[in-house]
Image (cartoon, rainbow, N blue to C red):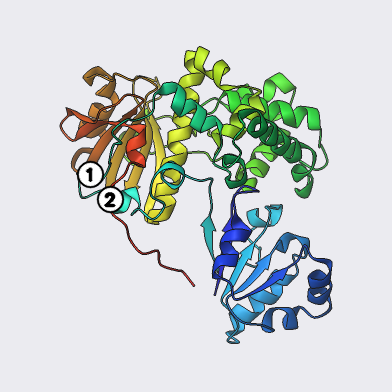
């Protein structure tokens, strides 16, 4: 068996894989790569297991050897495979399909940075209403949250003390995505590679983060045709730079629900760098404040859902825009709604979309609604719906569990 770790570059895939591996094959090392090329079977059967195969994309043929070992049940393995994204991950014929457990890694969540990394995932403790959230005595304010968001969740960036140096590092990351990473993807993106256009696409995607803007809105300012824009989007998704929430629509009345995806950068700091924005820029603009706070909180929920393993995230919006729920979490048959506000003083009126979701959409499947806000207090807004400071996601006192290995 094997585990494939994917996620944005710099998120810590190699470091995480090395923590469980007993031997390692680093294909970025010329000697390891030459040995794998000369005798790939020996390369994966010599040494102790689990075996970390790092930077697989530098010698993709090694995965066909892994596939053979898994199919023939030779007793080798388990394998932990890490590396950068390529088109291969999008292909049905990729050798890892059906053989590797795919785990996506994201940037550090708030509770990893400010709370307890070992805390039980939110959706695993959901049935205990008191344990769902634990609000710190002195929660952050709006500007604090924005600074946290723009500081990024990439491990090597979050440890940088200087705001200017963090911003410089994130801009360098964006430059690398534009000038280098896109080149690993085949045509039509490779054939039409244009750094200026791709940078424009990144910028306007960032400015539309947490929205349902059509592809044309993002592509048109840079003069990008539809086919090329789709190629850019596929590449960014494979790289883990963006992640789009599909619309939830299971009811017969789904024709009333928009079919557009909700677009998100997976890291708010990268979104700011791609858009050329700082904390003051975002703070002064009401629309950007809402988008970046939404993107930041959705990133936390994405990590919680991935850690739970049995939760899928969606969004919900009526075609006429009368109602929208920022994030819908489906846990088995149960449905949980989340609204995200940059406001520090939410009222019952702010929960109207969650009330609609409870009464008209989820009905007997409703397991709760949460309005995240930038204020200080957790309180009830309506039946089964509460207001919670964003920091409640990582506050102290959360129950802990032992992490179980998949290997």
Q: Residue at x 38, y 39 (%)?
A: 248
Q: Secondary structure at mark 2?
A: loop
Pick out the residue farthest to the front. 161
Pointer 2 residue: 333
Q: Residue at x 80, y 38 (%)?
A: 179
Q: Position of residue 63 (x, y in %)?
A: 69, 70
Crowd tier of the residue under label 2, counting other residues whose Cα lies within 10 Å: few below 14, some 14–19, many 20 or above = few
Vertically, is 288 above or below 121?
above
Vertically, is 381 above or below 114?
above
Pick out the residue farthest to the left. 383
Crowd tier of the residue under label 1, counting other residues whose Cα lies within 10 Å: few below 14, some 14–19, many 20 or above = some
On the picture, is 251 further left or further right than 149? left
Residue 4 lies in what quarter of the image? bottom right
Foreground pick, 148 / 323: 148
CA separation in Å, label 1 and label 2: 7 Å
Q: Residue at x 65, y 48 (%)?
A: 9
Q: Quadrant of the N terminus?
A: bottom right
Vertically, is 16 above or below 76?
above
Residue 231 lies in what quarter of the image? top right
Foreground pick, 319 / 401: 401
**Do we see residue 170 in this rendering?**
yes
**First in sequence: mark 1 or mark 2?**
2
Q: Position of residue 382 (x, y in %)?
A: 17, 28
Tell me the tag on residue 365. 1
Asked if the residue at tag 2 contacts the one at tag 1, i.e. Cβ–Cβ closer than 8 Å, the answer is yes
């Amino acid at each position: 068996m094997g585990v494939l770790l994917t996620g944005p570059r710099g998120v810590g895939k190699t470091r995480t894989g090395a923590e469980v591996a007993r031997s390692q094959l680093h294909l970025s090392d010329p000697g390891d790569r030459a040995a794998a090329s000369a005798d790939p079977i020996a390369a994966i059967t010599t040494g102790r297991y689990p075996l970390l195969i790092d930077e697989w994309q530098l010698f993709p043929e090694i995965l066909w050897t892994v596939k053979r070992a898994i199919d023939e049940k030779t007793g080798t393995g388990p394998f932990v495979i890490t590396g950068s994204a390529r088109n291969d991950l999008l292909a049905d014929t990729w050798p890892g399909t059906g053989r590797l457990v795919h785990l996506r890694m994201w940037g550090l969540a708030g509770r990893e940075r400010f709370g307890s990394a070992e805390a039980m995932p939110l959706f695993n403790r959901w049935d205990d209403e008191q344990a769902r959230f634990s609000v710190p005595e002195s929660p952050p304010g709006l500007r604090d949250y924005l600074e946290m968001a723009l500081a990024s969740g990439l491990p090597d960036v979050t440890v940088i003390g200087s705001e200017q140096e963090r911003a410089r590092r994130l801009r360098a990351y964006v430059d690398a995505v534009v000038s280098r990473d896109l080149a690993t993807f085949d045509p039509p993106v490779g054939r039409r590679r244009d750094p200026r256009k791709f940078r424009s696409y990144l910028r306007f995607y960032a400015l539309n983060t947490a929205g349902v803007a059509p592809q044309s809105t993002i592509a048109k300012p840079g003069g990008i045709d539809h086919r090329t824009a789709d190629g850019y989007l596929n590449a960014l998704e494979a790289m883990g730079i963006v992640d789009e929430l599909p619309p939830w629509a299971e009811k017969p009345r789904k024709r009333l629900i928009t079919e557009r995806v909700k677009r998100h950068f997976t890291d708010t700091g990268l979104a700011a760098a791609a858009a050329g924005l700082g904390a003051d820029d975002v703070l002064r603009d009401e629309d950007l404040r809402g988008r970046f706070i939404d993107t930041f909180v959705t990133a936390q929920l994405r990590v919680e859902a991935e850690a739970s393993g049995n939760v899928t995230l969606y969004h919900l919006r009526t075609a006429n825009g009368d109602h929208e729920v920022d994030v819908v979490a489906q846990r088995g048959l149960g449905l949980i709604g989340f609204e995200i506000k940059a406001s520090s003083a939410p009222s019952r009126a702010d929960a109207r979309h969650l009330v609609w979701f409870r009464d008209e959409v989820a009905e007997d499947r409703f397991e709760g609604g949460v309005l995240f806000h930038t204020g200080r207090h957790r309180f009830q807004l309506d039946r089964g719906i509460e207001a919670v400071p964003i920091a409640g996601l990582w506050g102290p006192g959360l129950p802990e569990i032992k992490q179980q290995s998949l290997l």
